[in-house]
Image (spheres, rainbow, N blue to C red):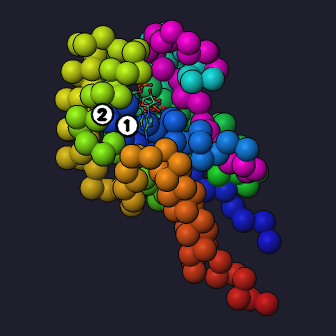
Amino acid sequence: MIEKGRLIVVSGPSGAGKSTVVFKAINGRDKMCFSTSVTSRKPRPGEVDGREYFFIDAARFEQMVQNDELLEHAVYVGNYYGTPRKFVEDKLSAGESVFLDIEVQGARQVKEKMPDAIMIFLIPPSLGELKKRLESRGTETEETIKGRLARAREEYAEADFYDYIVVNDDIDTAANELLSILTAEKCRFAARRQMLQE
Ligand code: ADP
Ligand code: 5GP
């Protein structure tokens, strides 16, 4: 039996380690992929167009929204972010599981459109540790770090619609928890009911 791909939404404060943990989890695994978003944010040093994001300007972003090319989109600390719809739909129909690293407003839109999506909230062990990680990543000004920490507190207050919380203290443990959630979801009775037909 071909098992359907699943959509996995991973949200959590900027700097919690979402991209680190998601890439650790999918690295070298078949039938799992990451959806690269579009953003109007400027690339950070070391970021490559088409790898971390597709970097586009605000006008092109607005055009994509008009053309209904985005599965979801949001403004986060002054920049646009969105998930290209076609990539996600193509991969899911090919049986691949697709990870989205998106913030809370976009995650809410995905849950409404695709209620089967697995909703995971990934957090650092503490907000103090979050500040340290944002500082050590070395990509943000003090002003942006403040904005991101303020947004983290707001996101915690809005996060009650997620299905799971993963605490990213140790990267390997967090990546294993992510994969274990996916495994358990695949074993759900409802997902495998048709196996009982034989
Ligand atoms: P996000 O995608 O949530 O914004 P990143 O994956 O960019 O976060 O991680 C933010 C910073 O924290 C990076 O410098 C990363 O190397 C570091 N980091 C990620 N996970 C851990 C962890 N478990 N322990 C310590 N540092 C971590
Ligand atoms: P960063 O600028 O640190 O890369 O990302 C800032 C925030 O935007 C993070 O919370 C990240 O999850 C979120 N984000 C990245 N891509 C998307 C997207 O396509 N849609 C939405 N809604 N949020 C996104």
Is residue 156 covered in magenta? Answer: no
Tell me: residue 187, above or below residue 122: below
Tell me: residue 168, above or below residue 190: above
Residue drawn at (60%, 74%), measured in percent from left and top?
187
Q: Residues within 10 Å of mark 2 (few under 14, many from 20)?
A: many
Q: Give how far across and how far down residue 163 sits, in percent.
A: 39, 61
Within 8 Å: ligand 1 and the Cβ of disc 1?
Answer: yes
> Which residues lie in the magenta part?
29-50
Count how many numbered circles sit on residues in the image.
Answer: 2
Residue drawn at (59%, 30%), measured in percent from left and top?
36
Amino acid under disc 2: Leu
Residue marked by disc 2: 130
Amino acid under disc 1: Ala
Residue drawn at (48%, 20%), measured in percent from left and top?
39
The secondary element bearing badge 2 is classed as helix
Q: Are marks 2 and 1 in contact (CB under 8 Å)?
A: yes
The secondary element bearing badge 1 is classed as loop
Q: Give how far across and how far down residue 24 sits, in percent.
A: 59, 42
Tell me: residue 116, above or below residue 141: below
Task: Measure the alpha-carbon separation of dots 2 and 1.
Answer: 6 Å
Q: Residues within 10 Å of mark 1 (few under 14, many from 20)?
A: many
Nearer to us in this view, 58 or 35:
35
Nearer to us in this view, 57 or 138:
138
Is residue 37 covered in magenta? Answer: yes
Q: Quadrant of residue 17?
A: top left
Please indicate, yes or no, whether residue 111 appears anywhere in the rendered image.
no
Quarter in which the N terminus is drawn: bottom right
Q: Give how far across and how far down residue 179 sits, in percent.
A: 57, 57
Residue marked by disc 1: 16
Q: Tell me which image quadrant ligand 1 sits in.
A: top left
Q: Give how far across and how far down residue 81 sits, in percent.
A: 44, 26
